[in-house]
Image (spheres, rainbow, N blue to C red):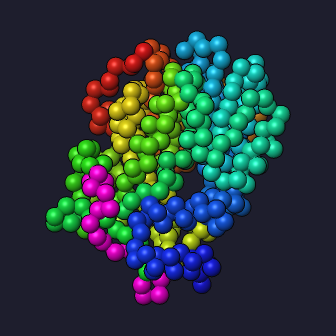
Amino acid sequence: MTGPFTETVRAEIGRRGRVTFAEFMGWALTHPRHGYYTAGARTGRTGDFITNAQVPLFGEALAEILVDMWDALGSARWTLIELGAGDGVLAERVLTALDRRGRARRVTTHLVEASPAARAAARRRLSRFGGVHLHAALADLEHTAGVEGCVYSNEFFDALPFHRLRGAAGGPEELFVTEGNGGLLETPGPLSDPALAALLSSAGISLEEGQETEVCPLVDAVQEELARVLARGFVLTVDYGGAAAEVHHPTRARGTRRTFSHHRVGDDPFRDVGEKDITAHVDFTRLARAGEERGFRTVFYGDQGPFLLAGAEGTLRAAIEAVPSRGREVQQLVHPAAFGEKFRVLVQSVNAGGAALRFERAARVQRLGLGAPPADRG
C-alpha cells in the first residue's frame, strides 16, 4: 500500500513526463504539508534512526572543541550557526556546556532548520538562552555576514537533494523519475545540466558503464553562502560518506542512496513518499574542494572517533570519572564498530591564521586527494 502523497506525486510526474531525482527528493523531504522533515524530527529509539545528537555527551564534547577554536582565534564574542538544527537538542547541549564554562553569554546562536514544527520545538527548548535566532533557510541569514565563529552541522549534507547519474558508453547519463507500470521508476536520459558531469570529472571520477552514483550541486550553493556569512573562523561538518574515490567506487554499483524507516535501511524511495528519510553518502572531496574554491582551507578530515578523542579528551574523561556509566556514551561516539568510524569529520577554516587545534593530531587530510592545501586567507 502507498500513501495519498505518493499518488499525488505520481500524478504530477505523469503530467510532466519526468523530473530529476533531486526535484523528487525535495518533494519527499520538504513538501510544506507532506514532506518527511516538515512534521519535525523522527530520530531516537522510537523514530527512524539514531544519530550523534541523541547521545548527550556529543554536544558536551563539541562544546570543548568549539572553545578550543574560540581561544585559538582570541575573539571577544563568538557566533555559532548550526545547519539542520532539528528540534534544537544538540544546540541545547552545546549551549549548556558553554554556560558551565562561563561562555554562553558571549555567544550568538543561529539555528537553520527547514521544518516549522522542529523550529517551534527548538524555540521552546532554547528559551532560557539569550541570543538564539531561528531561520528556515541559510539564505535567511542575509543580515548575518562578516561574523567570527563556527558553522557546524551533524548529518546535514547527506540529506541535500541530489541527482542520480549512470555511466554509459558516451558519457554519464541522468536517471530521471518517471511514472509507469503502476508506480514510480527511474528512466535514463541526457543530463539535465551538463555541469553535473564536471562534478565527477573534477575529482578524477569516471563511471563504469552501468555504474550508478549521486552528485549534489547544492553543496556549492551552501559553501557560497557560508563564505558570505563567515569572515573568520571554522566550518565543522559531521556526516557519513568518504573521499570521492570511496563514494564513487565501482564496487558501489547502485550508488549510495538509502532510505531509513523504523531503524531499517531500504533502497526504494518511491513507495510511501514522505514517510521515510532519503540520504546518500557525502562526497567529502567535493565538499572540501567547494570550500577551497571560495577561500576556505581544509585543516582536518578523519573519522569521528579519533577526532573526539584528540579534540575533546578532557570532556570524555571527566564524564566517565563523574558517572562511570557514561562510558557507554563514549563507546557509542568513538568505537569503530559504532559511530567512531561510521561518521567522518571535515573542518575548514577561514582567516584563522594557522591556529593550532588539538583535534588536528588525528587529521588524515591526505585521504581526500586534494593535493597541497591552499594558504589561509588570514
Q: Is residue 232 above or below residue 142?
A: above
The residue stretch that appears in magenta: 180-197
Position of 99 with respect to 351 (left or right) is right
Quarter of the figure that contains the C terminus: top left
Residue drawn at (26%, 66%) of the image: 190
Return the x and y of residue 208 as percentages of the image width and height.
Answer: 21, 61
Q: Is residue 237 above or below residue 263?
A: above
Q: Nearer the viewer, residue 51 or 147?
A: 147
Position of 315 with respect to 6 (left or right) is right
Quarter of the figure that contains the N terminus: bottom right
Position of 73 with respect to 362 (left or right) is right
Return the x and y of residue 230 as percentages of the image width and height.
Answer: 52, 27
Asked if residue 182 can be seen in this view, the reply is yes
Check residue 316 for magenta coloring: no
Return the x and y of residue 71 as percentages of the image width and height.
Answer: 59, 15
Position of 207 with respect to 49 (left or right) is left
Q: How many marks?
A: 0
